[in-house]
């Protein structure tokens, strides 16, 4: 077995010729036993040297005539600009055995291994280039197929149109105090964006916050934080940078708002399936068996969707992040304690919880600090906390 391996190494070493010599010295080279490492060059005028599986690092000559012939060939070789300067070593034909043995040892040893390694890299690089060209050709074929069949890169696959009920109170205040969740009734495979319908948008003073996540893994997909100035009282398209890939999962949409003004998020027609109705942690009469007014668009998994009107890119990508949003429950807020610091004790209650309004009242004092505290309200691991304040008395 060892003999077979070493034989294979000698054959591979012989494939790459690392020594150059003149054709005049063919007999001397064969006598020295290095003919398998030598590429013979012809220095005749007008003859362009050709290298095949050769990268000469040194040139040897056994006579003045062969050296002159070899130098002429090297001058023509330098015009190709593919190999560096090659030194010429003059050898004595009578005492060349020792020098040729050294050259052969270097060529078949470390230099030979490096040359074989470089040759293998060049071969693999050529294969990668061919594979890349084939992949690009396949992409072009796919594009031609899409254009031939008039397939749209982004297509609407589901939609709930907006519906106005005379009894609607509006969920603008609910979005400010809590959030509204909506399960998408389609698989996550290929989902490229979602459109929400707004029936009214304030000029300023509000911001729409929307997150998209997987139900099964609770993994976030994307988050949008959009000021009211960039929204329109119509369909607003929230796009993903690339259509969802991987396995089919269930998507959950969560919508809320910040700021003193409220957003008019539209609801759809009542439906029979409670699973796909909009819901919130705070009961609201408008959410009785009604979904949000939304549309779902799909495209090629992993491909960037094309531009659409009112297209809004994500503010942040939540790929690999697990975010859990929670609200302080009424029983927790009901435990608020007055911790105001004032030299004069007022005759009214400074801090109290309004159960029906799901809010805390903090009455300002003439001097000192008005404050309330709720113990053990924030869960461990919380990274941010937000609240909205309203001044409703002159």
Image (cartoon, helix red, strand yellow):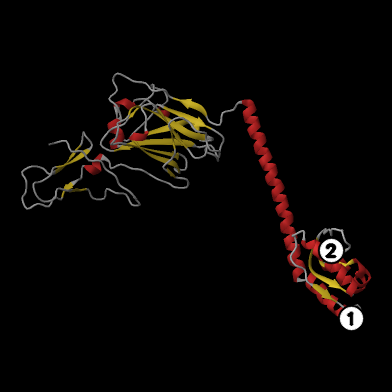
Along the viewing direction, whichever of 224 and 76 lies nearer the viewer: 76
Dot 1 or dot 2: first in sequence order is 2
Which residue is denoted by mark 1 in the rendering?
Answer: 95
Which mark identifies residue 11?
Answer: 2
Crowd band around label 2 with a 10 angstrom C-alpha radius: few (<14), some (14–19), many (20+):
few
Answer left or right for 201 relative to 150: left
Could you say whether the residue bearing mark 2 is in a helix, strand or loop?
A: helix
Quarter of the figure with the N terminus: bottom right
Determine the secondary structure under disc 1. loop
Residue 121 lies, with reference to residue 284, above or below; the image says below
Q: Does the CB distance between marks 1 and 2 fall below 8 Å? A: no
Q: Residue furthest top?
A: 166
Whether residue 13 is visible to the viewer of this picture, yes or no, is no
* Residue 41, image x, y percentages: 86, 64
- Of 345 and 388, nearer the camera is 388
In this rendering, position of residue 169 left or right of residue 108: left
Q: Residue at x 29, y 23 (%)?
A: 168
The picture quadrant where one finds residue 181 is top left
């Amino acid at each position: 077995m060892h003999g077979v391996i070493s034989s294979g190494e000698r054959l591979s070493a012989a494939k790459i010729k690392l020594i150059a010599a003149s054709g005049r010295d063919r007999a001397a080279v064969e006598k020295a036993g290095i003919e398998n490492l030598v590429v013979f060059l012809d220095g005749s005028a007008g003859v362009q040297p050709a290298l095949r599986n050769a990268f000469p690092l040194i040139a040897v000559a056994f006579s003045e005539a062969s050296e002159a012939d070899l130098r002429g060939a090297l001058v023509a070789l330098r015009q190709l600009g593919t190999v560096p300067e090659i030194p010429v070593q003059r050898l004595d034909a009578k005492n060349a055995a020792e020098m040729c043995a050294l050259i052969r040892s270097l060529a078949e040893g470390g230099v030979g291994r490096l040359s074989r390694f470089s040759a293998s890299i060049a071969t693999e690089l050529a294969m990668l280039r061919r594979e890349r060209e084939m992949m690009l050709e396949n992409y072009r074929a796919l594009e031609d197929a899409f254009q031939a069949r008039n397939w749209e890169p982004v297509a609407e696959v589901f939609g709930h149109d907006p519906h106005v009920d005379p009894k609607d109170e509006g969920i603008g205040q609910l979005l400010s105090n809590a959030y509204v969740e909506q399960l998408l009734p389609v698989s996550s495979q290929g989902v490229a964006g979602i459109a929400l319908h707004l029936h009214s948008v304030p000029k300023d003073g509000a911001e729409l916050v929307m997150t998209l996540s997987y139900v099964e893994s609770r993994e976030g997909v994307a988050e949008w934080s959009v000021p009211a100035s960039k929204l329109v009282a119509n369909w607003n398209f929230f796009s993903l940078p690339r259509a969802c890939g991987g396995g089919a999962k269930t998507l959950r949409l969560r919508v809320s708002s910040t700021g003193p003004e409220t957003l008019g998020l539209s609801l759809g027609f009542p439906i029979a399936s409670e699973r796909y109705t909009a819901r919130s942690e705070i009961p609201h009469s408008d959410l009785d068996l009604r979904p949000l007014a939304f549309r779902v668009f799909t495209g090629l998994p992993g491909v960037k969707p094309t531009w659409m009107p009112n297209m809004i890119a994500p503010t942040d990508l939540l790929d690999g992040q697990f975010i859990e949003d929670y609200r302080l429950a009424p029983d927790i807020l009901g435990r608020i304690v007055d911790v105001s610091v004032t030299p004069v004790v007022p005759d009214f209650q400074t801090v109290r919880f309004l159960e029906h309004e799901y809010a805390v009242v903090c009455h300002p004092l003439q001097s000192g600090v008005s404050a309330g505290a709720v113990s053990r309200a924030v869960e461990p691991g919380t990274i941010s906390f937000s609240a909205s304040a309203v001044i409703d008395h002159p």
